Image: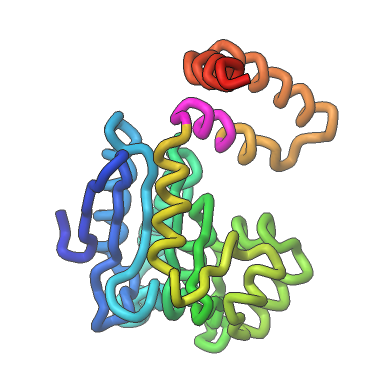
């Protein structure tokens, strides 16, 4: 395990991955990308992991790509840079493909690729003082890969505004436009986060996997195709042991 990422497996299968470059505001570099990919691949195969939590060490979630590495890439070939970028893209894809909830817990700043990393997660829980943004345009750069997720989350018009101006969003505005899931007050932040994560960790793993798979497969489908997919998932869900057990428990209380 790289020192760029701290791994902790807690109760009820909650795997916390903490970005660990607080002196660099947890900037994403090659070592961190490799560590994230390894952990996501391991979590996929580990039956003891029920939910993955991604958060940052220190005051910030993540400031984006390591600018020293990014500047050095200007001297590489387009093919080398494409392969390098694809590695970070693989992190986003693995997060979506993982049949377990991935939760971003954001304190401080989530900027550029760091904001993209949060957006790639299934749920984003933000501290009320958190700040989000895609300031790449101010550095002559394009937030190219994250736009695949950003447009899905907030729509084309808002996405263009965010990436073309690079403006910063307080957590309240990020919530209002659909970029994040919830804003947690500072007084009970850790307790509120733990409550949400615990609820996910104790839910039926098969049910959550079906929800996640259907949700992301809906994109680009026509309405009839989406309904047909829903009927297929509905049929699968009815045959799972967790469904039968949950309904039996409910009926026994009546």
Position of 16 with respect to 165 (left or right) is: left
Q: What residue lies at 44% left-to-right and 70% top-to-bottom?
A: 188
Q: How many marks?
A: 0
Q: Considering depth in this image, is 126 or 122 the residue closer to the camera?
A: 126
The answer to whether any part of residue 86 appears in the image is no
Start-end of magenta stretch: 204-212
Position of residue 71 relative to residue 4, above or below, is below
The answer to whether any part of residue 49 appears in the image is yes
Quarter of the image holding residue 3? bottom left
- Residue 167, how many percent across, how many down? 62, 85
Q: Is residue 207 magenta?
A: yes
Q: Main secondary structure of the magenta part?
A: helix
State the residue lying farthest toward the bottom. Answer: 138
- Residue 43, how many percent across, how many down? 31, 39
Q: What residue lies at 28% left-to-right and 62% top-to-bottom?
A: 18
Q: What residue lies at 15% left-to-right and 53% top-to-bottom?
A: 1
Position of 176 with respect to 93 (left or right) is: right
């Amino acid at each position: 395990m790289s020192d760029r990422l701290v791994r902790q497996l807690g109760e009820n299968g909650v795997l916390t991955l903490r970005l660990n470059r607080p002196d660099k505001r947890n900037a994403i570099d090659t070592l961190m990308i490799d560590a994230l990919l390894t952990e996501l691949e391991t979590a996929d195969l580990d039956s003891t992991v029920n939910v993955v939590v991604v958060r940052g060490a220190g005051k910030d979630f993540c400031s984006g790509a390591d600018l020293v590495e990014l500047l050095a890439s200007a001297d590489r070939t387009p093919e080398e840079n494409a392969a390098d970028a694809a590695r970070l893209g693989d992190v986003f894809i693995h997060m979506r493909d993982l049949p377990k909830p991935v939760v971003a817990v954001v304190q401080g700043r989530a900027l550029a690729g760091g904001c993209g990393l949060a957006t790639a997660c299934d749920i984003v829980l933000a501290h009320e003082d958190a700040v989000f943004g895609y300031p790449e345009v101010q550095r002559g750069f394009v937030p190219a890969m994250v736009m695949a997720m950003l447009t899905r989350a907030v729509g084309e018009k808002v996405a263009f505004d965010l990436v073309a101006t690079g403006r910063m969003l307080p957590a309240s505005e990020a919530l209002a436009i659909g970029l994040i899931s919830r804003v947690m007050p500072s007084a009970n932040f850790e307790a509120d986060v733990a409550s949400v994560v615990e609820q996910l960790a104790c839910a039926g793993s098969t049910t959550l996997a079906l929800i996640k798979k259907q949700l992301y497969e809906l994109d680009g489908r026509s309405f009839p195709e989406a309904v047909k997919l829903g009927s297929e998932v509905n049929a699968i869900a009815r045959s799972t042991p967790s469904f039968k057990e949950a309904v039996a428990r409910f009926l026994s209380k009546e």
